[in-house]
Amino acid sequence: MLGRPDGAALRTLVWESSTPRARLLLLGGRADFLEKWAETIADLHAMGFAVASFDWRGQGLSTRLVAGGAGHVDRFETFLDDLDHLAGRLADELGGPWVALAHSMGAHLLLRWIADPSRRAHPWRAHLRACVLIAPLFGLAMAAPLRAAVMLAARRAVRAGRGARFAPGQEPFGPQQTSAARAAILTHCPVRFAEEQRWVEACPALACGGVTWGWIDAFARSEAALEALPLERVGVPLLALLAGRERLVSNRAARRVLARLPTAAVETVAGAAHEILRERDAVRAAALSRIDAFLARSLA
């Protein structure tokens, strides 16, 4: 566990390698925890990377922000501050070079972090050689009128002091998180989908349910903050993999954001749902091969 000055703790993982190609920081998505990424972490380590990762605050075994198992944050800057702290420690203690692989919410946060001019002098930033964004969360997959209504309701709920409450249709980890409907959105691999439930049954503290009004409002504000950044000045090589059968995040929003990045290569993974690296073997292997080749070119 990595302690924070405010008393919070981040559950971290560092898996060293005797002669690494580079060090790789893996950033998971909303409601993820380290165990969900165990297979991919092992694959990345077998590729020759020393791997570091952590549970975002409010999920996994890091400090939670509300009781009741909700996925909650009042501002995405909380996540960015934690990334500042962890990345600083990694740079100071391990040196570099580094690459980063980030999924969904993690990809959103990574791009905000590297595009922020105020973070260009951060020690870890100087070691960063390349980034891979997997199914990045740059917008939600919903019609514009519905999105506007949801975001307005979230803003009003937060102002009324209800930010820590579940949004309608959201609930603690349970039948909703293990349903066939959720599986269809995330992955076509039933074995990998079922792993999440097995981990939660073994360690109930890992469970993270649906989102709160506060999380929705925080995302809306972070979405605006990201698009206001000088993305055209990002010089780090980037590979973005979009899911061909995406139903959770907006690929249209992703393409709009990524088009502003001069060094971004954007590819679609055919047959993949949102959790590309927890998909069926053939789909997953193809994505890992693309990632390996991109990182090899970036580190050459």
Image: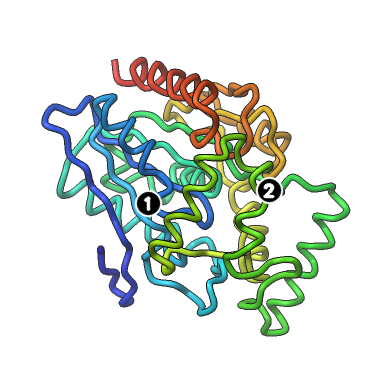
In the displayed orientation, state which residue is furthest to the left.
18
188 and 89: which is toward the camera: 188
Please state which of the two labelled residues, at mark 2 or mark 1, is closer to the viewer. 2
Front residue of 270 and 122: 270
CA gap, disc 2 and disc 1: 23 Å
| Residue 35 spot, x, y in % from top left | 38, 50
Check whether the beta carbons of the residues at disc 2 and disc 1 lie within 8 A of each other. no
The label shown at residue 157 is none
Task: Answer with left or right where residue 44 lies relative to residue 30.
Answer: left
Mark 2 or mark 1, earlier in chain: 1
Please state, as top left, top right, bottom left or bottom right, where the N terminus lies in the image. bottom left
**x and y, in percent, of residue 132 in the image:** 45, 32
Rendered location of residue 218, percent (x, y): 61, 64
Residue at label 1? 34
Q: State the residue at coordinates (61%, 45%).
A: 137
**Horizontal arrangement in the rendering, residue 94 relative to residue 181 (left or right):** left
Residue 11 against residue 68 in the figure, above or below: above
Picture disc at residue 180:
2
Give residue 149's quadrant in the image. bottom right
Q: Residues within 10 Å of mark 2 (few under 14, many from 20)?
A: few
Q: Residue at x 37, y 55 (%)?
A: 83
Q: At label 2, which amino acid type do we have?
A: Ala
Foreground: 228 or 207?
A: 207
The residue positioned farthest toward the bottom in the image shown: 161
The residue under the point 73% across, 71% down is 155
Q: Amino acid at mark 1?
A: Leu
Q: Quadrant of the C terminus?
A: top left
